Image (cartoon, rainbow, N blue to C red):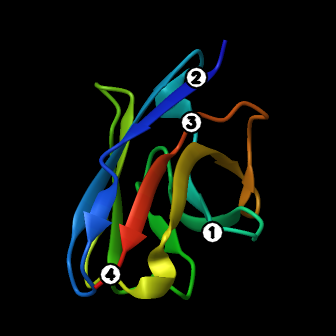
Amino acid sequence: QVQFVESGGGLVQPGGSLTLSCAASGFTFSSYRMGWYRQAPGEERVFVAAINSVTTYPNYADSVRGRFTISRDNARNTVYLQMDNLKLEDTAVYYCNAVSNPYRPQFDSWGQGTQVTVSS
């Protein structure tokens, strides 16, 4: 079955950096566009970033473009999210999933997510 295991979250001050990882299994990872979503308290889960399967071309939400960088390692079935210059509004639980057009999650299954808290 499809599984995602996210890690790397934590508490960081504004302006700081974190790198998230997501290990995926249960599907042919290299064939799918992969991405990150986040859910802030009291809000719906929203798209953050995606990376194509072959071209590795990235797409970003406007709110993170220029600060976040998505990458993938098909040999490890892992997708990463490098987050720089973090802001208070980046506080959320971060999840990964495969991404279908335009930016909807491909699978119904979700991992436990990883908490990112930006606070001074």
The residue type indicated by label 1 comes to Ala
Label 4 neighbour load within 10 Å: few <14, some 14-19, many 20+: many
Secondary structure category for the residue under label 4 = loop
Label 2 neighbour load within 10 Å: few <14, some 14-19, many 20+: some
Secondary structure category for the residue under label 3 = loop
Counting residues from the N terminus, which is met first, the one under dot 3 or under dot 1?
1
Counting residues from the N terminus, which is met first, the one under dot 2 or under dot 1?
2
**Residue occupied by mark 2:** 3
Please state the horizontal and vertical placement of residue 99, each as a whole percent of the image: 66, 49
Counting residues from the N terminus, which is met first, the one under dot 2 or under dot 4?
2
The residue type indicated by label 2 comes to Gln
Label 1 neighbour load within 10 Å: few <14, some 14-19, many 20+: some
Secondary structure category for the residue under label 2 = strand
**Distance of mark 2 from mark 3, alpha carbons?**
10 Å
The residue type indicated by label 4 comes to Leu
For the point 30% across and 26% down, which residue is it?
Answer: 76
**Distance of mark 3 from mark 1, alpha carbons?**
14 Å
**Distance of mark 2 from mark 1, alpha carbons?**
22 Å
Quarter containing the C terminus: bottom left
- Compared with residue 46, is residue 101 higher up or lower down, i.e. above or below? above
Q: Is residue 19 left or right of residue 99?
A: left
Quarter containing the N terminus: top right
Please state the horizontal and vertical placement of residue 65, each as a whole percent of the image: 44, 84
- In the rendered image, which quarter is residue 46 located in? bottom right
Residue that lies at the very extreme toward the front in this rendered image: 120
**Residue occupied by mark 3:** 112
Q: Which mark is residue 86?
A: 4
**Distance of mark 2 from mark 4, alpha carbons?**
28 Å
**Residue occupied by mark 1:** 40
Q: Are marks 3 and 4 in contact (CB under 8 Å)?
A: no
**Distance of mark 1 from mark 4, alpha carbons?**
14 Å
For the point 48% across and 72% down, which residue is it?
Answer: 91
